[in-house]
Image (spheres, rainbow, N blue to C red):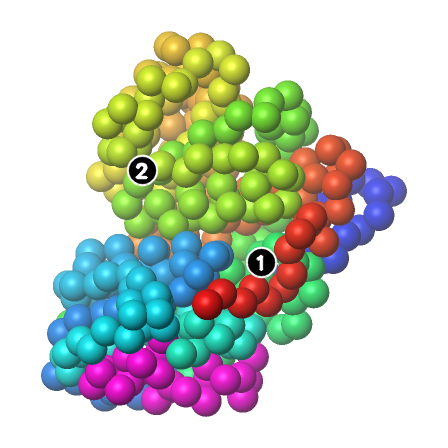
């Protein structure tokens, strides 16, 4: 966590609260799976509405819904509802609106639109009695507690946890993830207590203004969240790409002036491709930084931080934590205030 004798930022405090926040979230929401299953009965599609960090959490839920629950899932384009007022048949759909504050008007309006189109609706929010919570058939409240720093840390990971519970509830065999859910708070604490070589990771990122973040599959949402946090907290332009998309042309920009940051789950079918990608970009002269993965993945990187030992299905609940710790330290090293990034507010309104 924060360097010894340094001022402890609000962002650092909130990063440190995640084991307890995740425990509260899972303890309160896992018993509600039967309620979620009843709402979803007879509906065979999942639609996710979100922006920003919440959208990255929703990307994870999309993968989990299709891989774990066998339910086709997609990310909504909120403007289809709020600007175009398109009329869709959503009678066979469960729609989940995700917003930390529950007050982003675009998300509230889009979830209400889904209801008028026939969808069952669920809200994932950190604020009880928020407009989003009042709009939904079921409100799943995260246990993050008040989050005062602008960058989402504990609100992001608890959203990911809430979405994992919701998806498990609609799976053919709910409860198959329970052993992993039970390990999540302790895994979060381990990542805080033994984060790896943070000094080397921060130094590598401080030396460059060009970062490419890449991952794939269930952990791709985490990759995009890491990229977003680097951009908003450290004012570094970062491009986040699936490694499949990276190979379709953008890999041509990789050279010694660009740092490649790879985010990987501890196992799964995407891991060999990320190990191969590490070797490819290193061959182009790019320093390779890694978060997560296994021993082979970390050995393929120039600098790497350990991730969780959870299954790939649940690793994203805590995989962002090493990046959050790194980014908070990097911001301070660059002379920036991680609690209040330039030009940002806690609640962002869009049309």
| Residue interval drawn in magenta | 110-138
Disc 1 is placed on an element classified as loop
Residue 60 as seen in the image, left or right of residue 192: left
Q: Is residue 150 above or below residue 43?
A: above
Residue that mark 1 sits on: 152
The stretch drawn in magenta includes residue 90: no
**Residue at 46% over, 84% down:** 133
Which residue is the site of mark 2? 242
Q: Residue 244: percent from the left, percent from the top? A: 25, 33
Q: Callout 1: 10 Å neighbours few (<14), some, many (20+)?
A: many
Q: Is residue 32 above or below residue 11?
A: below
Residue 293 falls in image quadrant: top left
> Residue 276, image x and y in percent?
29, 22
Residue 62 appears in view: yes
Q: 188 or 13, which lies in front?
A: 13
Give the CA distance from mark 1 to mark 2.
22 Å
């Amino acid at each position: 966590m924060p360097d010894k004798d340094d001022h402890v930022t609000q962002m650092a405090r909130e990063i440190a609260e995640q084991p307890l926040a995740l425990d509260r979230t899972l303890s309160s929401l896992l018993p509600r799976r039967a309620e979620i299953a009843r709402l979803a009965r007879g509906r065979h599609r999942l639609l996710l509405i979100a922006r920003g960090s919440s959208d990255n959490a929703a990307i994870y839920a999309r993968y989990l819904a299709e891989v774990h629950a066998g339910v086709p899932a997609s990310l909504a384009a909120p403007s289809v509802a709020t600007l175009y007022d398109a009329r869709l048949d959503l009678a066979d759909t469960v729609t989940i609106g995700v917003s930390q504050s529950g007050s982003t008007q675009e998300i509230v309006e889009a979830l209400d639109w889904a209801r008028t189109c026939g969808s069952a609706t669920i809200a994932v929010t950190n604020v009880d009695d928020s407009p989003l919570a009042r709009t939904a058939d079921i409100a799943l409240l995260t246990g993050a507690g008040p989050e005062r720093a602008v960058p989402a840390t504990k609100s992001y990971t608890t959203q990911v946890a809430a979405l994992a519970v919701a998806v498990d509830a609609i799976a053919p065999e709910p409860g198959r993830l329970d052993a992993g859910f039970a390990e999540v708070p302790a895994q979060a604490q381990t990542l805080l207590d033994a984060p790896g070589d943070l000094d080397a990771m921060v130094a590598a990122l401080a030396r460059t203004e060009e970062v490419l973040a890449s991952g794939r599959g269930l952990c791709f949402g985490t990759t995009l969240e890491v990229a977003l946090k680097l951009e908003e907290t450290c004012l570094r332009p970062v491009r986040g790409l699936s490694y499949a998309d990276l190979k379709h042309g953008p890999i041509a920009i990789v050279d010694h002036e660009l740092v490649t940051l790879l985010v990987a789950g501890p196992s799964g079918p995407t891991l060999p491709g990320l190990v191969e990608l590490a070797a490819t970009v290193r061959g182009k002269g790019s320093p390779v930084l890694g978060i997560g993965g296994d021993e082979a993945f970390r050995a393929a990187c120039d600098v790497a931080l350990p991730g969780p030992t959870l299954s790939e299905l649940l690793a994203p609940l805590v995989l962002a934590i090493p990046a959050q710790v790194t980014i908070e330290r990097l911001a301070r090293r660059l002379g920036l205030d991680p609690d209040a990034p330039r030009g940002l507010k806690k609640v962002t309104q869009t049309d």
